[in-house]
Amino acid sequence: MEIETQIKEMLDEKFAGVVKEDALEAFVKSDVFENFKKELEAEKATVQEIKTELESAIAKFEAAPVINKEENLMEDITLSKAFDDVEENGKAGVAIETKALNQAQNVTGAPSQTFGVASGLHEDNPFRLLARKEITTATTAKVPFFAGGASGFTKNGATRGTANTSTDSTITEKTVSIGSYDRLEYVSNETISDIVNFDASMINQILGLAVETEAAEHVTTIEAVASPVVADAAAAITLDDLREMVFGLSEKYRKNAVIVMSTGAYSQLHTLTASTGSELVWDAKEGVYKLWGRPIVENSFMADPAAGEVVAAIADWNRAMVIVDRETIELERNTATPGKVGYYANYRTGHAMLDSNAIKTLKMAAA
């Protein structure tokens, strides 16, 4: 029954036989009227609470970061503005998410601020693109290291179920130290004032130099891998050399392996007439040359063919090598030196070999 009908019946019963004026005065003084007033006040308070919450939500929305309607990304802030916003006593520093630069895309499900610094830092270092990668906030990282293998139980009818007498495989824990690949450069105030967005350009330059140093150390690690295939000659590779390297890698690793070759060795490969159109094939779908079905990647940091140099490697890189990065890259601008501005980039990372069985290298013969 509707509330109006209930009130009317209550009034009719309470004030039966009373004149209208007396009834009205009595109603105003009654419990029914007081309860009605309380209900109205409670509803008013509820409406006010809803209004307050709505106003708060609108204020938060208006204060949210500006959204680029076309790209649905956060409006990019220049590195110069970022430095200006935090500068104190002539020094300013900001941090960039390492993944945002390495992968050239959002990696946390939300826009990542890069301040205009170029992404894809390691495009010239294939070891970086192929190896297993981890992120840490510490100065070291511990990873499992596999350095040997053993056969399982014998599975023939005569000896099935007998104890395994082979040597146990060796798995240890390896600590990867996180080192600093940093670079500091000073430039004159006049240079900065003449070039638009100079801060980002300079940081891109010195970051590039820092990662080149790291790429050279990756090559040094690959060169130290034990039991390389040794080429027949000191300055020229052959298909037989490459065949021995490729098929010297166990099939379980080879099926996901990628061949990495120095620029000089890669160039020589294309001059081996027996390889063209048979062993060496262009895969138009993947956009790479393949040798005996395995993709080839050029690495300009590896040595060209010369006596004693490691010029190629094949590996299941995700199983052979690990690279551990610090979570952020630190960037600084310092104007404390009169007439000059210092730019500093600190990229912290470490790497290690994980499975010595997952890689095979090709080393040129001694002179």
Image (cartoon, rainbow, N blue to C red):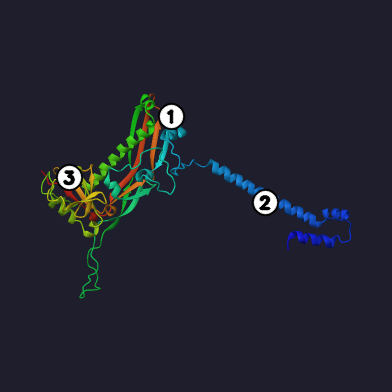
Cα distance in 3D space between marks 3 and 1 = 49 Å
Instruction: List x then y, in percent, for residue 215.
Output: 27, 42
Cα distance in 3D space between marks 2 and 1 = 53 Å
Which label sits in the foreground, 3 or 1?
Answer: 3
Q: Amino acid at mark 2?
A: Thr
Query: In what element is the residue under mark 2?
Result: helix
Mark 1: few/some/many CA within 10 Å (<14, 14-19, 20+): few
The quadrant in which the C terminus is found is top left
Residue depicted at 37% across the width and 48% down the height: 135
Residues under numbered marks 3 and 1 in contact, where contact means CB atoms less than 8 Å apart: no
Query: In what element is the residue under mark 1?
Result: loop
Residue depicted at 34% across the width and 52% down the height: 142
Query: In what element is the residue under mark 3?
Result: helix
- For this rendering, which residue is in front, 324 or 233? 233
Residues under numbered marks 2 and 3 in contact, where contact means CB atoms less than 8 Å apart: no
Q: Is residue 80 above or below residue 154?
A: above
Q: Is residue 190 above or below residue 247?
A: above
Instruction: List x then y, in percent, for residue 158.
Output: 20, 75
Mark 3: few/some/many CA within 10 Å (<14, 14-19, 20+): many
Q: Amino acid at mark 1?
A: Gly
- What residue is disc 1 on? 90
Which label sits in the foreground, 2 or 1?
Answer: 2
Q: Is residue 68 above or below residue 197?
A: below
- What residue is disc 2 on? 46
- What residue is disc 3 on? 265
Q: Is residue 116 above or below residue 32?
A: above
Residue depicted at 27% across the width and 44% down the height: 125
Q: Amino acid at mark 3?
A: Ala
Residue 55 located left or right of residue 96: right
